[in-house]
């Protein structure tokens, strides 16, 4: 029997899938070579190739591709950063994201270039510690500009809208990382004092940030392991932003929640920013995809919806309100769950 051609066509463009990886590889290569750092002014491909010690012809292909993707413009054969690339894709200044993007990419490395196939076939490797002290110190340093590009300011703005924000005098930020969130919260208030808690190697980074913003009088630090070390008391609010993920099992989460409850003043709030996987751990898409490499490596740091509010209520919080945030600065990976637990 003679075959006839299909008459049902795909709703999605599957053909573009193999090229999604090429888009990131193109930008990543430019970041690794520091190309954007060299293009504040128009330059020819051959001049750039000499400066980065690369093949002239392939450098031109790369620059053409970066132009096609909208990161550069090209006029009369000369390439130059767009205004946004100049501000956000170099390794310069307070908002250059080059280092931060390459650091995120390193987390994906174990699942790239065919390694995902091996992980799925063979399961997670035996050595599982992906988050050593040094990893955290490194990631705190490299994530500073990411926080400065609207995230810290967005979180501070959000918290400043809470009804009792004006009355806060003492705030604790656990797992504070480079400290920008605590600094921004303190800066949004005339008098409050914010205490940043993190591991000693990360607190070293936070102290540099505090100095940089001249906030030594109102932003203090405590170093240690918040799951075992004391973190003080008398707080009007405790912030935990993307840090409880490492304690996402009930038996690990419960004692931390109880500690937060005990450290808060009556009327105080525990404020948690986290992901919230829904619909059988298949949504939101960006979140599921971003956790995939670490999950395949045997370290599932994701939170399912309801786990945090349930743990907060079990620790004694009187009420928990949850809001789903989609602001791209606070939620660069699509969605952030914002939980506020109140102590009566
Ligand atoms: C993903 S970073 C989040 C940083 C910051 N809160 C933010 O939202 O940008 C997680 C931070 O939690 C800290 N952390 C995790 N477990 C900790 C513990 N037991 N004691 C102290 N810090 C901890 C890590 O060192 C790291 O700086």
Image (spheres, rainbow, N blue to C red):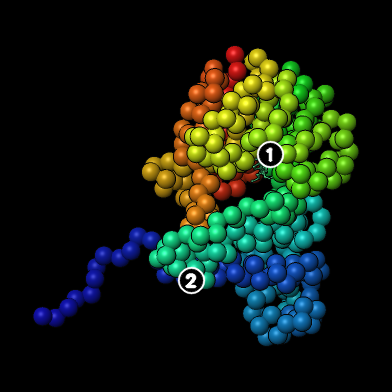
How far across and how far down the image is residue 276, in percent?
49, 40
Q: Are marks 2 and 1 in contact (CB under 8 Å)?
A: no
2 or 1: tag closer to the N-terminus: 2
Badge 1 density bin: few <14, some 14–19, many ≥20, Cα 10 Å? some
Q: The N terminus appears in which quarter of the rendering? A: bottom left
Q: From the viewer's perspective, is residue 37 above or below residue 133?
A: below
Residue position for label 2: 114
Residue shown at 51% from the left, 23% from the top:
313
Residue shown at 50% from the left, 34% from the top:
251
Residue shown at 49% from the left, 54% from the top:
298
Residue position for label 1: 225
Badge 2 density bin: few <14, some 14–19, many ≥20, Cα 10 Å? few
The front one of 194 and 201 is: 201
Label 2 – label 1 distance at C-alpha:
36 Å
| CB of mark 1 near ligand 1 (< 8 Å) | yes
251 horizontally vs 179: left or right: left
The quadrant of the rendered image in which ligand 1 is seen is: top right
């Amino acid at each position: 029997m003679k075959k006839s051609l299909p008459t049902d066509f795909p709703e999605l463009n599957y053909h573009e899938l193999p090229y999604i990886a090429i888009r990131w590889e193109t930008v990543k290569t430019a970041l690794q070579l520091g190309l954007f750092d060299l293009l504040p002014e128009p330059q020819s491909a051959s001049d750039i190739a000499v400066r980065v010690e690369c093949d002239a012809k392939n450098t031109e292909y790369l620059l053409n591709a970066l132009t096609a993707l909208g990161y550069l413009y090209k006029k009369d054969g000369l390439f130059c950063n767009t205004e946004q690339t100049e501000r956000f894709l170099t390794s310069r200044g307070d908002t250059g994201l080059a280092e931060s993007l390459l650091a995120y990419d390193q987390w994906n490395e174990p699942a790239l270039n065919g390694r995902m196939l091996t992980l799925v076939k063979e399961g997670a490797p035996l050595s599982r510690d992906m988050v050593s002290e040094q990893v955290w110190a490194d990631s705190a340093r490299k994530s500073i500009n990411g926080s400065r590009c609207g995230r810290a300011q967005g979180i501070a703005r959000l918290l400043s809208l809470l009804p009792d924000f004006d009355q806060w005098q003492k705030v604790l930020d656990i797992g504070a990382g480079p400290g920008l969130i605590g600094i921004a919260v303190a800066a949004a208030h005339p008098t409050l004092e914010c205490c940043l808690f993190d591991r000693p190697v990360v607190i070293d980074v936070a102290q540099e940030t505090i100095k940089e913003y001249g906030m030594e009088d109102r932003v203090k630090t405590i170093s240690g392991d918040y799951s075992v070390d004391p973190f003080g008391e008398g707080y009007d609010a405790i912030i935990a932003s993307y840090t409880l993920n490492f304690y996402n099992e009930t038996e690990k989460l419960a004692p931390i929640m109880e500690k937060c409850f005990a450290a808060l003043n009556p009327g105080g709030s525990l404020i948690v920013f986290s992901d919230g996987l829904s619909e059988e751990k298949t949504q939101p898409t960006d979140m599921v995809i971003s956790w995939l490499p670490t999950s395949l490596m045997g370290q599932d740091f994701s939170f399912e919806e309801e786990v945090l509010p349930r743990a907060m209520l079990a620790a004694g919080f009187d009420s928990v309100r949850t809001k789903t945030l989609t602001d791209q600065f606070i939620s660069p990976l699509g969605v952030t769950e914002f939980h506020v637990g109140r102590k009566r």
